[in-house]
Amino acid sequence: MSKKQINLASIATLDQINAMNKNTIMEQIGIVYTELGANYICGTMPVNAKTHQPMGLLHGGASCVLAESLGSMGSALLADSRVNNITGIEINANHIRGKREGTVTGKATIIHYGRTTHLWQIEITDEGNNLVCISRLTVLVVPKQQ
């Protein structure tokens, strides 16, 4: 767990961060940020034809898009993306349970909050709170060149 306790809701509103999804993959596949809290950010994604693989199941890559979207947005808020470049540099995911339809919810919790790197753990669950995917994301924070 991160030693620094930060309430992401004190940095931005859901309306502000959801507006950033315009013209992105997040908008295309229906990701919506739903909650900001102490060291975490949540969002949902529909499981439908846009997020399926050919066998009609939730595509593992779509789960990774949700995971990276949550962690990267959390880092953008924490590290102030107006003055820092925020870049995901590594993601891993274990796909636990298949899902054919409905909605999945991701919760990204920061587990390391450093000056130049952030590490997020993202749990993606279904409507019954069953674990669908667990992921870790490492984000690099680099000051923008002036």
Image (cartoon, grey):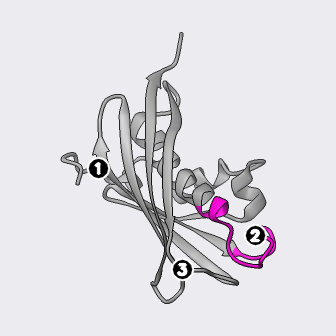
What label does residue 53 carry, if any? 2
Q: Is residue 115 left or right of residue 67?
A: left
Q: Position of residue 57 (x, y in %)?
A: 70, 77
The kind of secondary structure element at disc 1 is: loop
In the visual, does 94 lie left or right of 40? right
- Amino acid found under the numbered disc labelled 3: Arg
Return the x and y of residue 51 as percentages of the image width and height: 73, 68
Looking at the image, residue 42 sits to the left or right of residue 30; the answer is left
Q: Nearer the viewer, mark 1 or mark 3?
A: 3
Give the number of the disc on residue 145: none
In which quadrant is the N terminus drawn?
A: bottom left
Vertical placement of residue 38 versus 125, above or below: above
Callout 2 environment at 10 Å: few (<14), some (14 to 19), or many (20+)?
some
Q: Secondary structure beneath disc 3?
A: loop
State the residue at coordinates (77%, 77%). 55
Which residue corresponds to the image point at 57% horizontal and 51% vertical from the top-left?
A: 17
Q: Earlier in the sequence, mark 1 or mark 2?
A: 1
What residue is pinned by disc 1?
Answer: 6
The image quarter in which residue 33 lies: bottom right
| On screen, residue 8 above or below 142 | below
